[in-house]
């Protein structure tokens, strides 16, 4: 997807739909609406590691075949380990679990989209329709927790793709993982956009009573129409707030993440989002600024041109003003919050609203002293 030049604006007006169609027609990447109905991305570009790039186009001879709609396909992935380690200095955890690869929610801004390129697939529509499930995740976790010398720290789940995305209803991998963690008294922190998390209130409430569990609901907007186009298969904002109420009522420490904040599109809702979070029972809140690494940038820009063409230039200009003139800056300490006057204004608004609502007065710290290594099936027992 190429940048919009002054000539483009002069030819097509101030960010109209005709301009978006012109640019995508030049790129040859956009997928027909009927094929991608109910999906977030409008593009399906080849992964960055592929030697060839392919795109369908009409050569004038009416030879373009009618391709079927994108349907969710789940393949089984059997990794050798399930706990992923990281040493990033600007996040609060050093280990995480991803029960699935790819995410059916289809959030157009998802920073995890580029990871699908490692599978030889597109970060576009493939990311939200061609998924991988890890049915042996619970068994792997049990084995890894039982290893001699395992050092207990909170495990984060939902950091890359959502563990409660729609396919979890069928596969149930997340619940199996929680059963292993509960049996071992192992701390866990969960991030999700799905109301399906309330299915596991029974396990989470028991763990929370011991100081072993907390949940964060990601809520980007209260505008249902915007959410439907931006996060097409995630729970509606009202259902996410209802999940916050149910989790809080069950005694589970619950946080609301306004992530991502999109400048010029959702930043006007900061105060209302925090009001709604506090009213639903959340005691902690946080935010992350829009991140557009690698292939996410053209996918998001295409979405913005299709749905909010009148805001395109304003949103991109504000975003770049917080990223040193670039679409994205991956530097530690900058990638989550941005820099510059507008980023500072967002930070201050968020802090003041949280203080007014008595949010973030205490941070939930999960216990690690209750851990008991698993001794279940598939775990090698000690000789003595």
Image (spheres, helix red, strand yellow):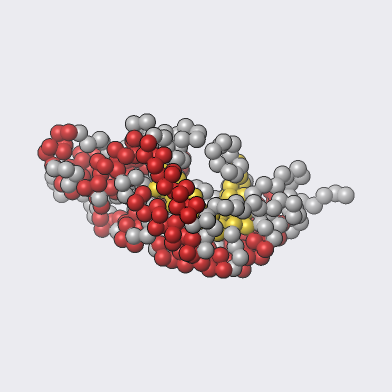
Hey, which residue is sitting farthest left in the picture?
11
In-image side of 330 versus 327 (left or right): right
User: Is residue 382 positioned above or below 293 on the image?
Assistant: below
In-image side of 55 versus 250 (left or right): left
Residue 168 in percent (x, y) is at 51, 61
In-image side of 334 versus 52 (left or right): right
Residue 169 in percent (x, y) is at 50, 65
Residue 99 visible (yes or no): no
Out of 38 and 235, give the one closest to the viewer.
235
Q: Which residue occupies 58% across, 39% down?
A: 86
Out of 46 and 111, give the one closest to the viewer.
111
Numbered marks: total = 0
User: Is residue 347 positioned above or below 246 on the image?
Assistant: above
Out of 325 and 234, give the one closest to the viewer.
325
Residue 49 in percent (x, y) is at 41, 35
Hey, which residue is sitting farthest right in the picture?
384
User: Is residue 167 positioned above or below 22 on the image?
Assistant: below
Q: Which residue occupies 39% across, 34% down?
A: 340
Out of 375 and 370, give the one closest to the viewer.
370
Q: Which residue occupies 36% across, 49% down?
A: 267
User: Is residue 7 positioned above or below 72 on the image?
Assistant: above
- Where is residue 120, by image quadrant? top left
- Where is residue 91, by image quadrant? top right
Q: Which residue occupies 40% across, 39% down?
A: 343
Residue 258 visible (yes or no): yes
In-image side of 170 versus 29 (left or right): right
Quadrant in which the N terminus appears: top left
Residue 345 in percent (x, y) is at 39, 42
């Amino acid at each position: 997807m190429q940048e919009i030049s002054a000539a483009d604006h002069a030819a097509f007006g101030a960010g109209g739909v005709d301009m978006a169609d012109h640019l995508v027609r030049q790129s040859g990447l956009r997928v027909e609406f009927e094929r991608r109905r109910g999906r977030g991305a409008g593009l399906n570009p080849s992964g960055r590691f592929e030697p060839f790039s392919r795109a369908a186009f009409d050569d004038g001879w009416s030879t373009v075949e009618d391709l079927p709609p994108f349907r969710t396909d789940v393949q089984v992935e059997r990794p050798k380990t399930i706990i992923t380690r990281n040493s990033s200095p600007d996040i609060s955890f050093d280990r995480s679990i991803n029960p699935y690869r790819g995410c059916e929610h289809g959030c157009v801004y998802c920073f995890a989209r580029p990871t699908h390129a490692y599978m030889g697939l597109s970060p576009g529509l493939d990311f939200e329709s061609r998924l991988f499930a890890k049915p042996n995740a619970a068994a792997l976790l049990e084995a890894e927790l039982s290893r001699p010398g395992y050092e207990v720290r909170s495990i984060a789940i939902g950091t890359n793709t959502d563990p409660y995305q729609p396919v979890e209803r069928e596969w149930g991998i997340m619940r199996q993982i929680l059963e292993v963690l509960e049996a071992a008294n192992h701390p866990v922190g969960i991030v999700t956009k799905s109301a399906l998390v309330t299915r596991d209130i029974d396990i989470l409430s028991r763990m929370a009573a011991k100081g072993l569990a907390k949940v964060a609901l990601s809520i980007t907007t209260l505008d249902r129409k915007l959410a439907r186009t931006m996060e097409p298969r995630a729970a509606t904002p009202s259902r996410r707030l209802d999940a916050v109420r149910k989790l809080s009522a069950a005694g589970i420490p619950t946080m609301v993440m306004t992530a991502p904040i999109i400048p010029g599109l959702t930043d006007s809702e900061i105060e209302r989002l925090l009001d709604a979070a506090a009213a639903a029972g959340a005691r902690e809140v946080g935010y992350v600024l829009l991140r557009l690494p690698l292939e996410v940038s053209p996918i998001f820009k295409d979405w913005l041109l299709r749905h909010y063409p009148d805001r395109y230039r304003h949103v991109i200009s504000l975003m770049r003003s917080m990223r040193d003139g670039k679409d994205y800056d991956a530097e530690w300490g900058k990638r989550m919050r941005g820099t510059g006057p507008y980023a500072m204004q967002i930070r201050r608004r968020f802090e003041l609203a949280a203080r007014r609502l008595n949010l973030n007065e205490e941070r939930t710290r999960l216990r690690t002293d209750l851990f008991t290594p698993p001794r279940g099936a598939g775990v090698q027992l000690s000789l003595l």
